[in-house]
Image (cartoon, coloured by chain):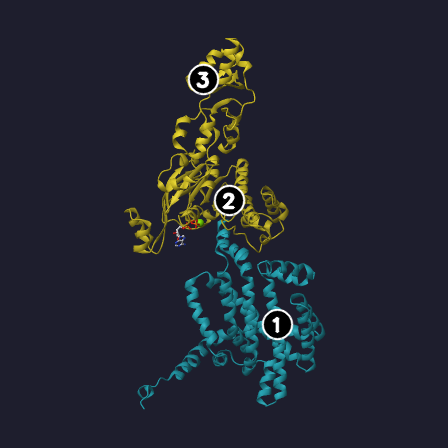
Amino acid sequence: MLSPADILTIPFDDWVNTLVRDYLVPNFRPFFRALQVPVTTVLNAFDAFFQFIPMVVFTLVLAFIAWRVVGRGIAIFTLLALTFIDMIGLWTETMTTLSMIVTSVLFCTIIGVPIGILVAGSNKLWSVVRPILDIMQTIPSFVYLVPIVMLFGVGMVPGIIATIIFALPPIIRLTNLGIRNVRGDLIEAAEAFGSTRWQMLWEVQLPLALRTVMAGLNQTLMLSLSMVVIAALIGAGGLGLTVYTGLGRLDVGGATAGGVGIVLLAIILDRITQALGEQSGVRTPSLRQMLVSVFRPRGAVTGETNKTGN
Amino acid sequence: MEPKVKVRNLFKIFGDAPETALERLKQGQSKEQILEETGHVVGVQDASFDVGEGSIFVVMGLSGSGKSTLVRMLNGLIPPTSGEILIDGDDVANCSPERLRDIRRNKIAMVFQHFALFPHKTIAENTAYGLKIKGVSAAERREKALQSLDQVGLKAWADGYPSELSGGMQQRVGLARGLATNPQILLMDEPFGALDPLIRREMQEELLQLQRSLKKTIIFITHDLNEALILGDRIAIMKDGRFVQVGTAQEIVADPADDYVSAFVADIDRGRVFTAGHVANDAQAVQLSDDSQNALKAMEDLNRNALYVLDGERIVGVVTYQDLSTAIRENGKADGALADVLVSDYPVANRDAQLHELYGLASTGLPIAVTDKNGSLIGVVEPEAVFAQLSGDEQTQDSVRSDTPPAA
Ligand SMILES: Nc1ncnc2c1ncn2[C@@H]1O[C@H](COP(=O)(O)OP(=O)(O)OP(=O)(O)O)[C@@H](O)[C@H]1O
Ligand SMILES: [Mg+2]
């Protein structure tokens, strides 16, 4: 049977090799190295912090937050789950994973929210960014790893960079969506009173989009969690590494323990951020107030949100 | 005096190539034709008007007639296709963004049809929005917002949220927000459109009340002719983006420019459009010291059933032809007869009283004395004139009403 390959073969892999090895790596390596610096700094700070806090203190604080934000059920769950993780001997790994996730989410927010705001303001820009996000979300996560390794090397930080790239799209999409969905008459009202572009953003668009942005943050967080296992392939540590080494040694018990740790952490973080998103409905003006509400007498906060709860 | 707002030959066409559509429009093609052939929507065509300082200019028209488009151009929310908008001589359409922002912050405020309150801000914060944008300090902002809320009777709600208020209350907040920056001009785009009729009436009264003390220049949009007639010092009727008639309430009701306007005028509440001054006859009266025979003769000459009697400038009462002639027949030609038959419990109305308020007075059968604010007689309303005007019966109306309103 005649196939097109008999007539012409395309050395696609060679082309990519040439591009990455002979062009990007020698010319841009210092640039990519420099990119790692902020990630390394933040990651180290978080890791040091989480490793420093005694297990009991951390557990109580997180359970307290869960209680204020979500409710008693999740607070008890947090307490039990973290205790269990500690008892199966994975506390250090869990804190490493947590600092990786927090770092990744932080960078996703810092990069994603402004991009979301920018593309919300321009249909042209959105028509360029949108297909890029589509591609980012359809490429299997393993495929990222090779160019990441070529450009950044192996280790913790390249793993987090892969995670950031993987988890970035939802927060961009939902920030864009949240800002675009702000009612037109409110924008017009803000404009009619002489708001500058910045005042409009700060006073009207962001507070009203906050709920949707928080939903994006939640999705980004979940994607980060799912990526940490894969990132272990290129040398990232934490629970992902436990699972990965477990798999490599056919150590079912070890792999399962790591997996359970990830699932428990995922449930806790998911429920807390989801509830934060719901609280930041139209009523709560700012992130600051949202955080303040965590520490205010309980009745006052939930009473208000229940009244509007729509 | 220069008008506060001056608009000349204003056009707005929505679409990709408004210039070509504008050409077609100027060649006399209709809105439908242009939409069909080019896909351009004519929002406003050739609007020109002046609004004097402190007056209310109402734009009335059906849905889609271009009212919102017109009012949004006045504060630059949308740019006009051609034409000129001068606010105190500033060309809104062609000034720099900074100048426009300055005008919006300090001179012109807007009240919206669907309130457009910020759901994440308290009532006080909503009210203070314009002040915050201007950079007013928090304490002063709060104080002014409370003042402004007090004006509309919602001070107690300052720390609530818009979702806790009824539609009428939300619109009051919208009004308070507009007033808080103390603008000279208020643009109101169907502000009472979403309210039920009773609250609507109330809000209209409230607006007129406020306007008496605030003296803003107001451009008010409505699709309700009754509302337009009640509020407007001058009214423009809009159709397909064009002004079909501009005039006072009385001019529009008494003399509709075309069938379109007539159709609206047919079912309006005339009792609220016309005032006692509009239907009053000349202030013919006799002096108390006059001879009663002369009074009787005057009534015959003027073809009236009764005449008012003055003592100098002061009204002392009214005499009817019937009483006077009976008295003369019985007492002979005695002096002082005028005082004997004087009805001192006469119906009286201020010249600004609306016609529907005269309805009760007219049923006494006596002519109604129309007075100015000093209480001097400036005209007389025959009871038939009230009913004729209320029913919109042109013929009786013309025969009863004098064409030149009495001078003050
Ligand atoms: N952004 C726009 N793009 C295209 N056409 C528009 C736009 N805004 C308004 N129009 C058209 O302009 C015309 C006038 O609309 P406008 O909103 O000014 O009407 P309106 O008199 O305010 O009506 P309503 O009483 O329903 O508010 C309509 O035919 C409308 O379809
Ligand atoms: Mg409108």
Residue carrying label 2:
B106
Q: In this orientation, does residue B76 appear?
A: no
Residue carrying label 3:
B299
Give the Cα separation between the discs numbered 1 and 3.
96 Å
Nearer-the-camera pick, B367 or B354: B367
Nearer-the-camera pick, B120 or B204: B204
Res B166 label: none
Q: In this orientation, does residue A79 appear?
A: yes
Vertical placement of residue B385 versus B167, above or below: above
- Give how far across and how far down residue B75 sits, in percent: 45, 47
Work out whether disc 1 and disc 3 sit on a shared chain. no
- Picture quarter containing residue B86? top left
Q: Which chain carries label 3?
A: B
Q: Mark 1 lies on which chain?
A: A
Q: Which amino acid does label 3 sit on?
A: Met
Q: Which amino acid does label 1 sit on?
A: Leu
